[in-house]
Image: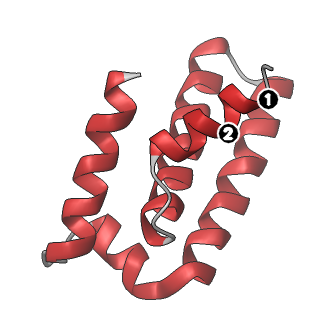
């Protein structure tokens, strides 16, 4: 998905440049644990939205979760291509 690549590139840029006031830079500076806490929080919000919220709210929460997973990927130097390759290997 093109948008995933675009967002990931911005995340890598924020990681490298660490501009003041950048949410991504703030997460990156907090290290893996800070990012994992956000993923845990966003995962819970996806589950809650799936159970009791509207479709639009669920979409919003899934987007938040995907964003934070992309931040973790950037932190760990895992690319969307790495994930695509893993998914492709599971289709064999």
- Of residues 6 and 52, the one nearer the viewer is 6
The residue where tag 2 is placed is 86
Secondary structure under the numbered disc 2 in the rendered image: helix
Give the camera-side residue of 84 and 2. Answer: 84
Q: Residues within 10 Å of mark 1 (few under 14, many from 20)?
A: few
Of residue 58 and residue 88, the one placed in the foreground of this image is 88
State the quadrant of the N terminus.
top left
Instruction: Give the label on residue 39, or none.
Output: none
Q: Position of residue 4 (x, y in %)?
A: 39, 33
Q: Taking 67 as reference, is 6 left or right?
A: left
Q: CA distance from mark 2 to mark 1?
A: 7 Å
Quarter the C terminus occupies: top right
Please provide percent x and percent y for residue 53. Answer: 73, 23
Which residue is at 60% across, 64% downward? 38
Q: Which residue is most to the top?
A: 55
User: For the image shown, how many numbered marks are present on the structure?
Assistant: 2
Query: Could you tell me if the residues under marks 2 and 1 are in contact, i.e. CB atoms within 8 Å?
Result: yes
The disc at residue 90 is: 1
Residue 34 is situated, as x and y percent measured from the top left of the image, at 57, 79
The image quarter in which residue 88 lies: top right
Packing grade of label 2 (10 A; few <14, some 14-19, many >=20) is few
* Image: 61 above or below 72: above
Q: Is residue 30 above or below residue 3?
A: below
Q: Is residue 6 above or below residue 36?
A: above
In which quadrant of the rendered view does residue 35 lie?
bottom right
Q: Position of residue 77 (x, y in %)?
A: 45, 66
């Amino acid at each position: 998905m093109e948008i995933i690549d675009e967002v990931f590139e911005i995340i890598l840029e924020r990681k490298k440049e660490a501009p003041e006031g950048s949410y991504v830079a703030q997460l990156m500076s907090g290290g893996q644990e800070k990012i994992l806490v956000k993923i845990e929080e966003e995962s819970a919000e996806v589950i809650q939205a799936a159970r009791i919220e509207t479709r639009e709210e669920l979409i919003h929460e899934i987007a938040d979760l995907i964003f934070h997973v992309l931040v973790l990927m950037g932190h760990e130097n895992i690319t969307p291509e790495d994930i695509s390759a893993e998914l492709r290997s599971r289709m064999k």
